[in-house]
Amino acid sequence: MTETLLFHVSDIHFGLENNEALDWFSAEVTRLRPSAIAITGDLTMRARHHEFRAAEDWIGTLDAPVTLDVGNHDMPYFNLIERFFDPYKRFGRMRDVVEREIDLPGIALVPLKTAVRMQPRFNWSKGWVTGRALDKCLAAIDALPKGTRVLVTVHHPLREVGTQGTALTRGGSKALAELAKRNVLGVLSGHVHDAFDIMEDTPHGPVRMIGAGTLSQRLRSTPPSFNELHWDGERLEVHIRNLEHVPDEAMKIDDVPEDAQPPRHEGEPVAPVGAVPRTDPPVN
């Protein structure tokens, strides 16, 4: 079987993007020609029209199929009517690639929505896997040809901490358990702005969770990076590519913080609805 190369990038945050990192990533797409690119959310900083236009222009230059998850930053912050009734409107022509399944020989990228327009807790920036979203993802997996392996794409990591008030992603534990039943290769995510590659135990076996860093100016503990994934039909290898040539292991955080939030940029406005001022959790 010919090896499949995939790129996994996240949290570009157009509006506070790192142009050097974006140019570098684009050059690597041209040079290595991945079979597909997974962008796991937070494409924009504040879901403003000009941020989406810049993102659309950049994605249009990438010579590879793209699937794009919606992040909490991609929901309208200041237009509540639009947020509730047409939250994807500002994606424009990019709506064709939002939560798009990509089928490749022997492997598929299947989206699982974790960003919701509203939820019954104050901080709407956190993730939620609704029953409807999980059912849609599982149905897509079950419909694939027998023997196809799956990488599920999400914005928020699915790791739960077992508490109602500060759970990282509501419904995450249930989603992981269901994905373990289907022997998925891994779950690709963003949101925390640092890379990780960990195994999460579930009642039905472990699930591999793979997080990408950021190509924005909103750095946490590591430089701008993206993940380069190699699938040979039996093994998935993940290499963290970064601008400062730091070795893979030194780029990874040990675990997802309990209340995972990327750092707040100085001068960044606080969303008026459903969000609270962010405090950075300890860096592991």
Image (tube, rainbow, N blue to C red):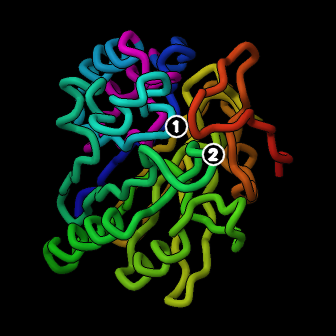
Question: Earlier along the polypeptide chain: callout 2 or callout 1?
Answer: 2
Residue at 48%, 80% in the rendered image: 177
Residue type marked 2: Asn
In reply to whether residue 124 is colored magenta, the answer given is no
Hey, which quadrant is residue 213 in on the image? top right
Q: Is residue 96 left or right of residue 172?
A: left
Q: Which residues are magenta?
A: 23-50
Q: Which residue is mark 2?
A: 123
Residue 233 seen: no
Identified at 46% across, 40% down, the residue is 71
Name the residue located 41 percent from the left edge and 76 percent from the top edge.
179
Asked which quadrant contains residue 246, the reply is top right
**Image height check: is 68 above or below 3?**
above
Q: Say which residue appears at 17% left-offset and 36% top-offset.
A: 96
Write down the residue under mark 1. 226
Look at the image and say whether residue 34 sits in the magenta stretch. yes
**Quadrant of the image for the N terminus?**
bottom left
Rendered image: mark on residue 11: none
